[in-house]
Amino acid sequence: MKKIKILAIVGSLRKESYNRQLALAAKEVIGDRADFELLEYHDIPLMNQDIEYPAPEAVKRVREAVKDADGIWFFTPEYNHFFSGVLKNLIDWLSRSISDKEPQVLAGKPAAISGISPAMAGTSLAQDHLVTLISFLNMDVMNVPRLTIPNAMQQLDSDGKLTLKASYPYLEKQADAYISFLQTRIK
């Protein structure tokens, strides 16, 4: 069996964002069971049909990364009860057909969703909105388990780094479930 390729998409561009740190923790949990890559997309322009064809090089690069992945694992913050604008912009680009002959790259991709927030409610509302969008785009969403971690500040060390004391077992559970989910879908 070929090695699974997971592409992590973090809904924040901040270098030390809690969700980026959560994605890196997920990478550790996955270990050698899969190739795990974080998508870098800070150079994606705002969606604009005037520049859609031919797509900017940055858009071509992220589309190729999505096409090459067996699954997409989203790590989303919650901004005003919604996922971030940068994540929405990226998904808008990925949701567009590449050409008359090639459809958008998200359709059929197995997806998992996690998120961490300093807020008490975690990222559950942002995740629900994200599920609505990616389901519309025909992604294969693993709804159970989803991971929403509230009170991020309680799981930081003295340097502000995420330690996931209380939430680590839940991340392990989600990672195991996602690997199994992907194994049943890889042809």
Image (tube, rainbow, N blue to C red):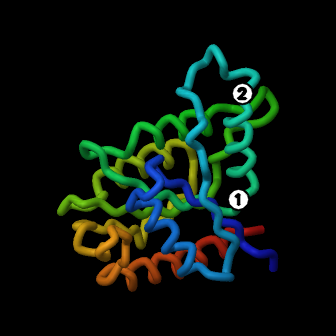
Seen in the image, is 41 located left or right of residue 60? left
- Identify the amino acid type marked 2: Ala
What label does residue 89 carry, if any? Answer: none
Going from N to C along the chain, the mark reached first, 1 or 2, is: 2
Where is the N terminus found, in terms of image quarters? bottom right
Q: Quadrant of residue 158?
A: bottom left
Classify 10 Å Cα crowding around label 2: few (below 14), some (14-19), many (20 and above): some
Label 1 sits on what residue type?
Answer: Ala
Give the quarter of the image for residue 49.
top right
- In the picture of the structure, the residue carrying the numbered disc 1 is 69
Image point 60% across, 49% down: which residue?
A: 40
Q: Quadrant of the C terminus?
A: bottom right
110 relative to 158, above or below:
above
Image check: 101 left or right of 129?
A: right
Residue placed furthest toward the left: 120
Residue 9, image x, y percentages: 54, 54
Contact (Cβ within 8 Å) of mark 1 with mark 2: no
The image position of residue 7, as x and y in percent, is 63, 60
> Residue at point 62% right, 39% down?
94
Query: How far is the residue under mark 1 from the one under mark 2?
Result: 20 Å
How busy is the neighbourhood of tag 1: few (under 14 within 10 Å), some, or many (20 plus)?
some
The residue singled out by tag 2 in the image is 55
- Disc number lying in front (1 or 2): 2
* Residue found at the far front of this picture: 159
In the rendered image, the residue lying farthest to the top is 50
81 or 145: nearer the viewer: 81
Q: Position of residue 111 (x, y in %)?
A: 55, 60
State the residue at coordinates (52%, 77%): 175
- Disc 1 element: loop
Question: Could you tell me which residue is drawn at 60 percent across and 59 percent down?
Answer: 38
